[in-house]
Each structure stands twice: as C-alpha cells, then as structure tokens.
Amino acid sequence: MINLAIVGDPEPGTAPAAPGKVCYDTKRRKEAQLEMNMASNILIVDGKFEDQVYELAVYIDRLNGATDEAAGPLVSSIADLSEEEVLQRLVEASSVLSNASEKEYEPAANLLINLIRSAPTPALIDTLLKNLSNPPSTPNGPALSLTVLSTVFNVLPSDSAFRAQTFLTLLSVARSHDLYDALQPQLTHLRTWLSEWSVPAEVASKVLNAVIDAAENAEDDKTAYATYLLALQQEGANAELAVRAVQHAVERPPHFNFDDLIALEPVRGLKTSKPEMYAILEVFLSGDYAGYKALPSHTFNDDLCTRKIRLLTLASLAASSISDGTRHISYETITSSLDIPAADVELWIIDCIQCHLIEGKLSQLTSSFTVHRATYRVFEREQWELLSKRLNVWRGSLEGVLSVVRGAKEGVQGVEGRLKEAQAQVNEA
C-alpha cells in the first residue's frame, strides 16, 4: 500500500498547484512508502476547511459540466449547510471523480479524504469506499483507485474498525482488476491488523475468508495456507473451514508438512464430525500410497492427491533407509510402493528431489537410489531415539579428537621441557 504525502506549498523552483489540484512532495512520498506500517501516514493539506470544501465542490461541479464556478449546483447547495451536512454532500457527489483525468483524480480524492478523516462516520465511510472503488476509466484507473483506497486505510487510526472495511474494499478492487500482486506483500500484517482492529469474530472471519479466496484465485498457495492457519485460530472457526484447509493442504503443491494443521482444534474436531476428512489428513501426515488408495471415495482432486502422496511415500522410504542404516532403496521397492512403471522411477526420484524432500544419488548400474538426506514427515519417539544415537556417535568422535589433541599437547609440553633442561645444562657448562 502507498503512503502519500500531500502538501500545500510547492518545492522551491516548482510551479504552484493549479486550482482543483494538490501539490506533491515527491521526496516525502518515497520516504512515506518506505515507512509503511511503521509510522502514521503523511497527509497534509494547506488551507482552511471552508477553502478546501469550496475548491473540491467547484471541481466536482466542473466534472458535472458546470461552467460557472460560483454558481455550480454543488457549490450552491452547500452554502448554508452545517459542516456535517457539507461533508455528506461532498462524499455523495464524489462518485463523479471516476470521470477525472489520471492527473487530477488522486489529488482530488485525497483532498476529500483529508476533509472527512477528522470525523469519519459509518455512513461517510460506506459511501466514500463505494465511490472510490469505482476506478477512473483510464488505463491506470484501477491502480489509482487502489492508491487512494490505500490512503484511506493509512490515514485511519491503526485501531480503527473502519480499517477492516477499507481493507475488504481494497482487496475487492485488487482482485477485480488483477492487482492482487500489488496488495500481496502487505498481507503478512494480517495477524497484527486483526489484533489492532479488535473487530468482532464474524468480521475477522470475513476478512480472512476474503484473503483466502483472493490468494487461491491468484494461485498464491503460501499466503492462502498461512491465512487458513490464522483463520482456524480465530473464535468461531468451524468444520467447513477446517475441511477447506485440509483440501488446500493436500492438493496444493507446496505443502508437504501437516503438523501445524493437524494441531489446530477445529481440524482435530474433524475426527468426530467428519472422520472421512480426518482420515485423508492422517494419510498425508504419516501414511503412504497404499493407505491413500484404501480410503473411501472423496471429492478432493484425485490426480493432485495421488501425485503428492507418491512423493511423500518416497520421502518416507528414504527416511526409513536412514533409520535402518542401509541408506539404499532399490528401484524395485520404489516401483512397488508407489505403484508406478519401472521406467518412471527415476523421474519420480528427481521430482522428489526438486521438492526438497530427499537428496541422494541415482545409480542405473545397481538400479538403486543412495540416500544422502531425507525429510521426516513426523518426528516421534523413533526419530528422537535415532537423533540421540547420532548425537552420541558425534560426541564419541569429538571425545576421540579431544583425546588426540590432549595427547599431542602433552607431547609438545614434554619436548619443550626437555629442551629447557638441555639449554640449562649448556648454559652451566
């Protein structure tokens, strides 16, 4: 999101702002971008409230075709209204800003944001977000809309519940106009934002589900999965969300570890509420291809699930070979365990290596795979015992090295002692 600096006085040597425009401080704008989420947004507009209102009203009338600045419909209608009523009229009339030029849209929108930010109300925010989410009909219109909505988000207090509503509008615009990538880097702040906003559980759920939908639509599996985990930790997380999270985890390519998912209460609850879904997750957690094929029919994508469970089965074979000390897997074992043609064995091994599940060396001569490293899918008693044995071996090796070093040190000290004695005898002679 973009922090925007708007100032009243131009930099020395620059032309003054024209009517209906706001002058930008480019240097401060860049600095504000770097300080996103670390400092309050800079939004400074020079002039009295009445002057700002008049300038914006004239500009809106001009967009609506008025030629007489002093007698335009909006200017005339707000002349005797209270400040609250004036703001309401300006916000309602702001829908015409979508007809503004690219050069004038952002300054005009930010002038409006500055006017209402001191006294935002649900009605004003609702109408403002609705109007600003309708981008100018220019090539860069959607990006400009995203920019001014970002400014709304940033100028609101960090603990304002209006930020949730603004964020949902931002996400909707980004998704509708294929601008998800512009918003994606900011999604790492979701947990902090939800904590700051202190919104009801249903609002938090709405925000998180919107992020999940947008991320999945953009095939951003990493963000989607992280958001599933966050959503399942919220109050009111239900079995339906847990099933969606399980399906995402077992189908999508990047996910091979399911410990963090199965540890969550709503997911554990599937064991009684939807045992068939829980059984699928258990197979992907620690089962194999044979266990997957034995499952009852399900609605998950079988092709994606089959590929992943074969990779996980191969990873388990590699891990087992390390545990039993052989560190070798025959192609025949792989063919049988994965239920694949013998000709495809090496391709599956290469795929598994590319997924960072295993490392090793292929041997066509011996028709086997030598395992150098393997990812353990679960880390239980057996793995702890193996780790303990390896640490003891390592400790023994270090003690052996230390013994050699000590012996060498004692030998050197003995030689030094004899040399000193010999030198003393020479000196006496």
Image (tube, rainbow, N blue to C red):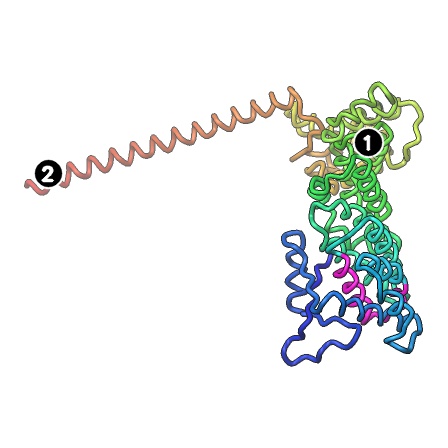
Q: From the viewer's perspective, is the residue at label 1 or at label 2 nearer?
A: 1
Residue position marked by numbered label 1 in the rendering:
309
- Residue 14 falls in which quadrant of the image? bottom right
Residue position marked by numbered label 2 in the rendering:
425
**Mark 1 element type:** helix
**Residue 398 vs residue 231, the one in the foreground:** 231
**Mark 2 element type:** helix
**Residue 286 vs residue 63, the one in the foreground:** 63
- Which mark is drawn over residue 292? none
Asked whether residue 346 is in view, the answer is no
- Give x and y (percent) for residue 169: 84, 51
Question: In the figure, is residue 215 to the left or right of 327?
Answer: right
Q: Main secondary structure of the magenta part?
A: helix
Q: What is the three-letter code of the residue carrying label 1?
A: Ile
Q: Which region of the structure is painted magenta?
A: 96-116
Cβ atoms at labels 1 and 2 below 8 Å apart:
no
